[in-house]
Image: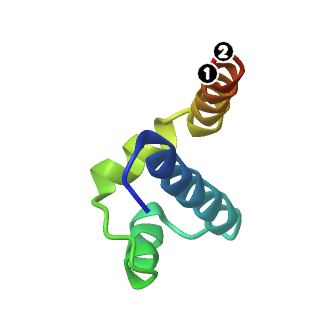
Amino acid sequence: MAYNRKNFLEKVIYVQEYYSAQNKKGIPNTRIVQNLKELNIYISLATFYNYLATPAKREIKEIEERERLKKQHG
């Protein structure tokens, strides 16, 4: 799979959903990042916080809308 913004945002959404599930259990953020590394997602704590601040679902909707419009117009 080629790298593009949509693939990046899907990874961000995965991290956000994983964080949400783990945070409900009361697991600290540093431990969540360690758990992500066990799942082969190697990010730093700073990147982790950047991922949490990214409006990924909204951006994916915008990308899909642009793709849909592009297909309609040629």
Mark 1, residue position: 70
Q: Residue at x 29, y 49 (%)?
A: 46
Q: Which of 3/46 is in front?
A: 3
Q: Which of 25/35 is in front?
A: 35
Q: Residue at x 31, y 57 (%)?
A: 45
Image spot of residue 42 (x, y percent): 31, 70
Q: Residue at x 48, y 51 (%)?
A: 7
65, above or below 3, in the image: above
Gap in angstroms between the C-alphas marked 1 and 2: 5 Å
Image spot of residue 55 (x, y percent): 56, 32
Q: Is mark 1 in CB contact (under 8 Å) with mark 2?
A: yes
Q: Residues within 10 Å of mark 1 (few under 14, many from 20)?
A: few
Give the SS element for disc 2: loop
**Amino acid type, callout 2:** His
Is residue 1 rendered to the left or right of residue 61?
A: left
Which quadrant is the N terminus positioned in? bottom left
Image spot of residue 17 (x, y percent): 64, 58
Mark 2, residue position: 73
Which quadrant is the C terminus positioned in? top right
22, above or below 58, in the image: below
Number of marks in the rendered image? 2
Give the SS element for disc 1: helix
Is residue 25 rendered to the left or right of residue 59?
A: right
**Amino acid type, callout 1:** Lys
